[in-house]
Amino acid sequence: MQWYGNRIVRAAIQRKAVFYLDKIIMSGMTFYGYHGVLPQERELGQQFVVDVELKLNLRLAGESDDPDKTVSYADVYEVVRQVVTGAPSKLIETVAESITGKLLQQFAVQQVLVRVKKPAAPVPGQFSYMAVEIVRSQAEAVGGQ
């Protein structure tokens, strides 16, 4: 019975390792795009606000003060800009998936969180924004899940 308990502890430690990764946080990136289900959204366009969190180990970058040991904020920004200002999608879910996929392919990160906000969503009522938030990991990208 003791062995079983240790196995559970080891498994829990391995799972928690992902949660203790460092983060690069890029918040409030604002772009004009033509995403939406309604024809007027795709014709007139609107503002989209994107937040990105990249989980990775930043220890080497922090200890060495070497920009080559981290992820370039400018390069991440450019990926996000290209997706949001690029080809229109009906759903912001699709925009978020595209951003996430490109970030996982192009940068050495373990996990990516992308939040796409639509402040002027064509929904009656008062609100700050409508949004989707997705989290994807390198393991999912490699495994195809």
Image: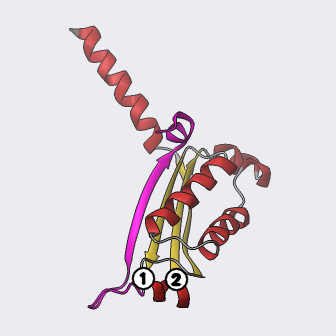
Asked which quadrant contains residue 9, the reply is top left
Q: Is residue 22 left or right of residue 13?
A: right
Q: Is residue 101 above or below residue 86?
A: above
Inter-mark Cα distance, 2 to 1: 7 Å
Q: Is residue 140 above or below residue 97?
A: above
Residue 135 in magenta stretch: yes
For the N terminus, the image quarter is top left
The amino acid pointed to by label 1 is Leu
- Residue at the (47%, 89%) spot, across then down: 40
Q: Is residue 90 above or below residue 126?
A: above
- Counting from the top left corner in percent of width and height, residue 2 is at 24, 10
In this orientation, does residue 32 appear? yes
Q: Secondary structure at mark 2?
A: helix
Q: Which residue is mark 1?
A: 38
Near-viewer residue (16 or 94): 94
- Residue at the (62%, 54%) spot, across then down: 103
Q: Secondary structure at mark 1?
A: loop
Q: Which residue is mark 2?
A: 42
- Judge the density around disc 2: few (<14), some (14-19), many (≥20) Cα neighbours within 10 Å: some
**Mark 2 and 1 residues: CB-CB less than 8 Å, in contact?**
yes
The amino acid pointed to by label 2 is Arg
- Residue at the (46%, 69%) spot, across then down: 92
Q: Residue furthest left?
A: 1
Q: Is residue 44 above or below residue 57?
A: below
Q: Which residues are magenta?
A: 120-145
Q: Residue furthest front?
A: 39
- Counting from the top left corner in percent of width and height, residue 32 is at 59, 84
- Counting from the top left corner in percent of width and height, residue 114 is at 49, 61
Please give the label number shown on residue 140. Answer: none
